[in-house]
Image (tube, grey):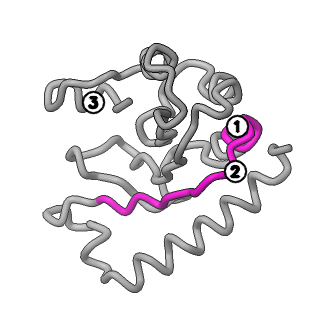
Amino acid sequence: MLHPVLMNIDTFICTLREAAQLVDDVNRGNFGLVADVWHLWHEVDIAARLEHLGERIFLAQLSDWPHGGPRTTDDRVIPGEGKLDLPGLVAAIRRAGYTGPWELEILSDKELPDSLWRAGFAETIQRSQSAFARLWQSSESRAP
């Protein structure tokens, strides 16, 4: 599912309920959800709802929502540098029983003055890795 901010750009499912229903309707072991917190965070009771998805989550994807909101469709910030409760969301995904890969989504509009791409690839990767380590540790107390 994608965040509704992209609603007029693509045709897609834009609620977690719709996405989970589609997975249930397809009912195949090789079809599941990407729990992308950038697209999910705004939904009501999202942490509690994520916990019930269990084996339907195939990938967890992390980035952060910029303070003040995204300026373009490609405006993400490094985890911990935005406004999301990432420790709570990560813990909820872990409580769902998800043990698969975690992807750091480094997506940024290179036209923005503070674009992640302007910092240089190595620096952006290092900051992202450090942020993920801090995030994982801070989610420990909320996870199983």
Which numbered mark, 2 or 1, is in the foreground of this view? Answer: 2
What distance separates the C-alpha of mark 2 from that of mark 3? 29 Å
Q: Amino acid at mark 2?
A: Thr
Which numbered dot is residue 7? Answer: none
* Residue 21, percent from left and from top: 48, 14
Q: Is residue 37 above or below residue 105?
A: above
Observer-nearest residue: 37 or 59? 59
Which numbered dot is residue 99? Answer: 2
What distance separates the C-alpha of mark 2 from that of mark 1? 12 Å
Observer-nearest residue: 62 or 127? 62
Q: Residues within 10 Å of mark 1 (few under 14, many from 20)?
A: many
Quarter of the image for the C terminus: give it.
top right
Question: Is residue 16 among the parts visible in the rendering?
Answer: no
Residue under label 1: 92
Label 1's element? helix
Quarter of the image for the N terminus: give it.
top left
Q: Is residue 76 above or below residue 113?
A: above
Q: Is residue 9 above or below residue 72?
A: above
Question: Is residue 17 among the parts visible in the rendering?
Answer: yes
In terms of sequence position, does the residue under pointer 2 or pointer 1 come before the other? 1
Observer-nearest residue: 111 or 34? 34
Which numbered mark, 3 or 1, is in the foreground of this view? Answer: 1
Residue under label 3: 5
Observer-nearest residue: 143 or 81? 143
Q: Amino acid at mark 3?
A: Val
Q: Is residue 86 left or right of residue 4?
A: right
Q: Is residue 106 magenta?
A: yes
* Residue 25, percent from left and from top: 46, 14
* Residue 127, percent from left and from top: 50, 75
